[in-house]
Structures are given as C-alpha cells and as structure tokens.
C-alpha cells in the first residue's frame, strides 16, 4: 500500500496516475476523481451493442493507480483505493457510477387533486333548453358527475 502524501490540502480527493503529465492531482469532488480514473478504463466492447451504456459498463483498468482521501486532522492525503492494472471497475464498488434516482411519482392523493383541478378547469357550457332537466349528453352534467366520482366538494 502506498504511503500518505503530504501536500497542501486544497481538495478532499486526489489521484496518482503514473504516465499522466502531473502524476499526483487533487480533485474537488469524488465524481471528478472517478472521471480521471475512467480515462484509463478499457470498456468492454461486447456489452455496448447489447444495450449497455458507458456509465453502466464495467471494463478493466489499463494502468495501476491510487485514489487518495484527505485526512483533515493530519493534513495528508491517505491512500483509499489501490487499483492494479487489469482490475475490473466492479471490484471497486466506490468507483462504479451511481444509479439514476427514480423519477418523481406523485401519491394517489396528489393525482386525485390534479384530476379534480383539471376537471374544474374545463369550460363546458350547458346548452340544454331547460336547465332543470338536462339531456343525457349534457357536458355540464358530465363535469358534475366526474367531480362527484373523484370525490370533490362541489
């Protein structure tokens, strides 16, 4: 395991990648460090035609690298993840991309409220000759029936 690196603690993460212009580089976020490491990731070509996208692809690393985390108390970057050449990205779960959050799904009560609002916004005029006796096809009567079925206060 590599030793801790004493450096000016600017960012919480750092990477050491041999062969890069600056071997040791700090990163402001974990996503930036993961992106720097993924530049040295040989993606599986067979998975791409079968519906895998580049974010969920596993792949193998083509270089030995180290990911560091800042120890704020000592002011040193301590090695966190050691990557060997030929390691699969799935061997290091912290480096796998996070799944997209599920889209927002409204509750039943919110859907009901939205439906009531939509029905109330309908502008249907009653064309029945006698307002007391509506015809079966009267749109105003249909609107009142819809609101009653949705449980709206009228």
Image (cartoon, grey):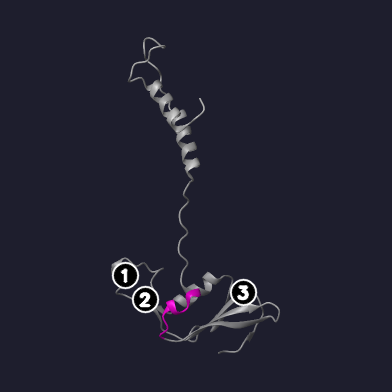
Give the answer, above or below, for where 13 lies relative to 146.
below
Which residue lies under the disc numbered 2? 43
Mark 3 or mark 1, earlier in chain: 3
Q: Decide if residue 27 is in sight here.
A: yes
| Residue furthest top as drawn | 130
Q: Secondary structure under badge 3?
A: loop
Residue situated in front as seen by the camera: 127 or 116:
116
Q: Is residue 35 magenta?
A: no
Mark 3 or mark 2, earlier in chain: 3
The residue located at (38%, 9%) in the rendering is 130
Could you tell me if the residues under marks 2 and 1 are in contact, i.e. CB atoms within 8 Å?
yes
Residue situated in front as seen by the camera: 30 or 151:
151
Q: Is residue 41 left or right of residue 8?
A: left
Could you tell me if the residues under marks 3 and 2 are in contact, i.e. CB atoms within 8 Å?
no
Q: Secondary structure under badge 2?
A: loop
Q: Which residues are magenta?
A: 86-94
Q: Is residue 148 left or right of residue 2?
A: left
> In whole angstroms, how far apart are the C-alphas of marks 3 and 2?
27 Å
Count the labels in the image.
3
Image coordinates of residue 119 in percent, x first then y, are 44, 30
For residue 139, which quarter of the picture? top left
Which residue lies under the disc numbered 1? 48
Q: Secondary structure under badge 1?
A: helix
Q: Decide if residue 121 is in sight here.
A: no
């Amino acid at each position: 395991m590599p030793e801790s690196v004493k450096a000016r603690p600017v960012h919480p993460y750092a990477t050491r990648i041999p062969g890069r212009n600056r071997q040791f580089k700090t990163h402001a976020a974990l996503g930036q460090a993961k992106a720097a490491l993924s530049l040295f990731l040989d993606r599986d070509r067979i998975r791409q035609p079968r519906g895998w996208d580049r974010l969920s692809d596993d792949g193998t690393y083509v270089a030995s690298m180290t990911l560091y985390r800042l120890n704020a108390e000592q002011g040193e970057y301590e090695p966190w993840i050691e990557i060997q050449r030929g390691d699969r990205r799935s061997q290091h779960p912290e480096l796998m991309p996070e799944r997209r959050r599920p889209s927002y799904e409204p509750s039943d009560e919110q859907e009901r409220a939205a439906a009531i609002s939509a029905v109330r916004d309908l502008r249907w005029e009653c064309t029945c000759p006698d307002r007391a006796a509506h015809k079966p096809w009267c749109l105003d009567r249909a609107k009142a029936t819809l609101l009653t079925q949705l449980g709206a206060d009228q």
